[in-house]
């Protein structure tokens, strides 16, 4: 792991790392983020693996300015107003997504969470890289968010390629998250921008998101329906039945697979990072094949396989 100084050379190295699909922790005004190129599903898969997340939670995509944010999401008047007032700063806006941020970073959602951080080092890094950077807090899943480079190193030194050391983060509290996809703003997480400041800026009350827990987005509710495929999902299949589509893993020789309506392999070489990177696009493509059932070959439950199985089990649950 490289420890980079927050100067021109360090920032250039960090941006080059993103371009190579590597993982770099960087300071923001809230906490350190663990960054990866948000448009590169393979890099984002490595990011989930490094964090040790048991599920694919949607990630915040960080950009340098509103013009860059507009390439990743559709800005409603509400979102535009909040961005104008609070960016750069500790406010994350959830808006309808374009195709720029990969589906894995969005955990398959049709929306994207966007933020323009106010930290000078983050600003320069994002402007230089020029593409959105997916970055959850740079701690192992379940640990507290890191406010010093030392915290990042203690948690993730063996998992990441570099840390850009910008000293302690000024706020130490994560960003406030507002869902701007509807008519009125919904508060998904309280953080660096107080509720009252947002209400004053908009001259309206903001509602706590009903049936939605931003800290546990995998819980039943609104998110679950977004996650669902139209086709029914049949897990741990040892065969492919007539008319079914098959989501394979590791080139398994399932009985009847040659007659399947459609077959996609998450990773013919049985690589779980590659499988995670392909997961949402393969599932979507098989769903579009029109098959009533997607038979899924067994996928190992280790590493990212746990998150893949978790997501599939949700999709397979009765609804
Ligand atoms: O201050 C912060 O926000 C820090 C720094 C690094 O920017 N980042 C951060 O990321 O706290 P993370 O991954 O720990 O939290 C991201 C939150 C999660 O609660 C997630 O559910 C929510 O953002 N989120 C991301 N995309 C979403 C979406 N499309 N819809 C709703 N919630 C979303
Ligand atoms: Mg976090």
Image (spheres, rainbow, N blue to C red):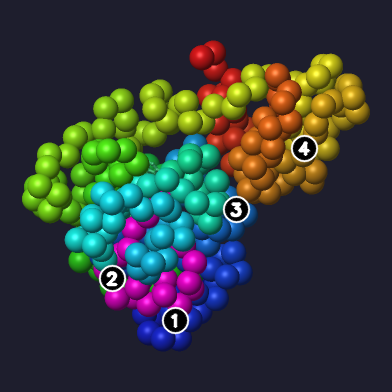
Q: Earlier in the sequence, mark 4 or mark 3?
A: 3
Q: Residue at x 67, y 30 (%)?
A: 287
Q: Earlier in the sequence, mark 2 or mark 4?
A: 2
Q: Residue at x 48, y 39 (%)?
A: 109
Counting from the top left corner in percent of width and height, residue 35 is at 46, 61
Which residue is the site of mark 3?
A: 41
Mark sitting on residue 119: 2
Magenta segment: does it hold 127? yes
How crowded is the residue under tag 4: few (<14 C-alpha within 10 Å), some, or many (20+)? some
Q: 269 above or below 134?
A: above
Counting from the top left corner in percent of width and height, residue 38 is at 51, 58
Secondary structure category for the residue under label 4: strand
Q: 291 above or below 6?
A: above
Tag 3 near tag 2, CB within 8 Å: no
Front in this rendered view, residue 60 or 174: 60
Q: Is residue 313 left or right of residue 254?
A: left
Q: Is residue 114 left or right of residue 198?
A: right
């Amino acid at each position: 792991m490289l420890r980079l100084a927050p100067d021109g050379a360090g920032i250039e190295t960090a941006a080059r790392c993103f371009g190579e699909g590597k993982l770099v922790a960087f300071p923001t005004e809230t906490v350190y983020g663990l960054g990866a190129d948000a448009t590169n599903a393979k890099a984002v898969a490595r990011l989930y693996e490094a964090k040790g997340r048991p599920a694919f939670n949607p990630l915040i995509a960080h950009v340098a300015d509103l013009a860059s944010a507009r390439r990743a999401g559709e800005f409603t008047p509400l979102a535009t107003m909040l961005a104008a007032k609070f960016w750069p700063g500790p406010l994350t806006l959830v808006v309808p997504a374009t195709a720029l941020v990969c589906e894995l970073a969005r955990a398959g959602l049709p929306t994207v969470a966007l933020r323009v951080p106010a930290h000078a080092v983050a600003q320069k890094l994002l402007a230089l890289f020029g593409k959105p950077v997916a970055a959850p807090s740079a701690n192992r899943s379940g640990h507290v968010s890191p406010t010093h480079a030392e915290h990042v190193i203690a948690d993730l030194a063996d998992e990441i390629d570099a840390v850009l050391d910008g000293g302690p983060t000024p706020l130490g509290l994560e960003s406030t998250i507002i869902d701007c996809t509807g008519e009125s703003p919904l508060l998904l997480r309280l953080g660096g921008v107080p509720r009252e400041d947002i209400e004053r800026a908009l001259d309206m009350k903001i509602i706590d998101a009903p049936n939605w827990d931003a800290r546990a987005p995998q819980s039943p509710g609104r998110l679950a329906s977004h996650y669902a495929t139209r086709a029914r999902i049949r897990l741990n299949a040892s065969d492919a039945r007539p008319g079914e589509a098959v989501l394979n893993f590791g080139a398994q020789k399932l009985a009847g697979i040659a007659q399947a309506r459609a077959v996609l392999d998450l990773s013919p070489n049985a690589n779980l990072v590659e499988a995670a990177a392909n997961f949402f696009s393969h599932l979507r493509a098989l769903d579009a094949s029109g098959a009533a059932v997607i038979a899924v070959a067994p996928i190992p439950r280790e590493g990212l396989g746990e998150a893949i199985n978790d997501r599939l089990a949700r999709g397979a649950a009765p609804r």
